[in-house]
Image (cartoon, helix red, strand yellow):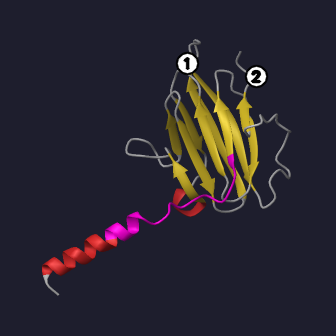
Amino acid sequence: MKPTQYLGAALLFMWGCQVLPAATRTGEVKNIVLRDDVTAQEIAVNPGDEIRWINEQTRIVQIVFSDLQPDRQLSCKNNIGGIFTPSNTARIAPNETASICFQHAGFFRYIVRMETGLTFGQINVPGLIEVSVKSGEGAGPAKAHASDGTESMSGLFQ
């Protein structure tokens, strides 16, 4: 084969890949809205469901997972880890989001860290994600859900 034929075949292959449909997630999306009055949060999901944190604060918020192994436990992640951020941490700017999907059942602990204008400087609020085959079993206290599926973390620092 001539070099131009290789180039043509490569371009045809690349064009073919671009017209393929985009992959879709099969699970539900559970939104956790981070406001100034954050409280401890427990959420139950199924494998493949997406947990999305939405920062509605005016400061950067961090989500730090205790024992997260992204290569072995996750099926998707957005804005978690990065060049200057550890692989178990999400840095969420105001009006931005971060999300994560787990492959297998288990309990995953995390901490929501945020700066505060108070004298002690930082608030650390624990959270727990229960990934199970049947969502909602043994997930802790019931939470109020908005019609859009949003769970609000509120009530502690008002």
Depth order, front residue of 114/76: 76
Q: Which mark is residue 121?
A: 1
| Badge nearest the viewer, 1 or 2 | 2
Task: Give the image quarter of residue 85.
Answer: top left
Q: Residues within 10 Å of mark 1 (few under 14, many from 20)?
A: few
Depth order, front residue of 15/42: 15
Residue ID at (53%, 29%): 95
In the picture shown, does residue 32 fall above or below 27? above
Depth order, front residue of 131/145: 145
In the picture shown, does residue 115 fall above or below 74? above
Question: Tag 2's secondary structure?
Answer: loop
Q: Which residues are magenta?
A: 14-29
Q: CA distance from mark 1 to mark 2?
A: 19 Å
Q: Residue 77: x and y, percent?
A: 53, 51
Query: What amino acid is labelled 1 in the image?
Result: Gly
Residue ID at (84%, 43%): 140
Task: Give the image quarter of residue 49.
Answer: bottom right
